[in-house]
Image (spheres, grey):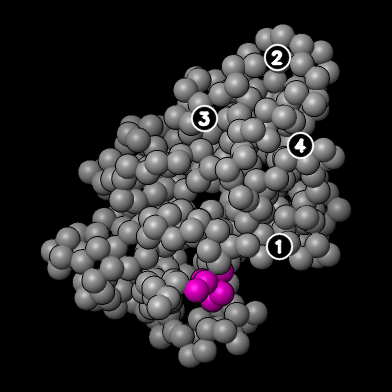
Amino acid sequence: MTQRIPTLVLGGTGYVSGELLRLLAGHPNFELAGVLSDSQPGESVGKAFPHLAAVLGNASFKSQTEIEQLISTLPQSALFSAAPHGAAAALIDTLLTRAEVAGTRPRVVDISADFRYAEAAAYEAVYKHPHGAPQRLAQFSCAVPEHLRKLNTPHVGHPGCFSTATLLASVPLLASGWIEPTLFVAAITGSTGSGRKATESTHHPLRHSDLYSYNALVHRHIPEIAACARAASGVSADFAFVPHSGPFARGIHATVQATLTSPRDTAQVLAMLRDYYQYSPFVRVLDTAPRMKDIVASNYAHLSAAANGRTVAVTSVVDNLNKGAAGGAVQWMNRLFSLPETTGLTAPAAGWT
């Protein structure tokens, strides 16, 4: 008999929430029990996401009070948080406290930035406000699923989308011991990475047929990338990261460049990457340059590499909403409930979008 796990989603109206709901609709084990939107309680979820209306039926957004009641009565539940950073931690703390009082057992995967750092001071240095639940930090691990095979905490904080793409390319290089610990990263993201609320950076007439960098060398994901890379590889490294806004809706194309400690050729680097990811079903290492169309709307990551003398470059492409957020979160939640990590996530990219 198929295990059915009641599932709650926080932060219900954003792009990441929409992608989560799309994935959950096809998942054989996670059964949607509630979607939180304090701004739209009682409103149709399908109205917020018309492309999902046919599979969401009569589902309506719930208030925080209703979600608290559910988490207090469900013996176990999967709780995905796509609430904004700065708000997610306090909300999750409130729900976990209710669960502890009631004796229920939720498992949390947070997609915001609130549980990506082991210490509150590190978070506060980046986001410039107090952490909402510092006493909960020890209950969360932060890593892409491919970089942490044994999980020792009950909950997970998922790295950001830029971080996911960069870490998938960087960590094998660092773990191999083949490179100097300074990495140069150029990464291009689609407009959905800026969120659902329209801004100048997402407005179609301004972004269409354009490409530009922003927050070069000072992007707030840099400390997160460095911390996750150190935890996964055991190497402290510096990341010179330059993000770019691209003229497309979804996907990230990241190229990581570094100096080799001794000359290597492309075949050696590709072999090293394949060996590192041999047990990672969602990571494919290609002989040719990866293309975003081959991964968009999927949980797959495609990597390739080139080496010339003492210079190496590894390119990574992921879908920012899927592998970089919702898909990676479902992958983690599968593991938290001892399901095969591929469950509900094996659909390929559309190919022509």
Identify the image quadrant of the C terminus. Answer: bottom right
Residue 95 lies in quadrant: bottom left
Using residue 135 as the reference point, say whether residue 11 is left or right of it. Answer: right
The residue that mark 2 highlights is 260
Q: Earlier in the sequence, mark 4 or mark 3?
A: 3
**Alpha carbon distance from label 4 to label 2:** 16 Å
The outermost residue toward the left is 101
Residue 181 lies in quadrant: top right
Q: Earlier in the sequence, mark 4 or mark 1?
A: 4
Q: Earlier in the sequence, mark 1 or mark 3?
A: 3
Q: Is residue 232 magenta?
A: no
Residue 304's disc number: 4
- Tell me which segment is drawn in magenta: 23-28
The residue that mark 1 highlights is 348
Contact check, label 4 and label 1, Cβ < 8 Å? no
The percent coordinates of residue 280 (x first, y second) are: 59, 45
**Alpha carbon distance from label 2 to label 1:** 34 Å
Using residue 65 as the reference point, say whether residue 6 is left or right of it. Answer: right
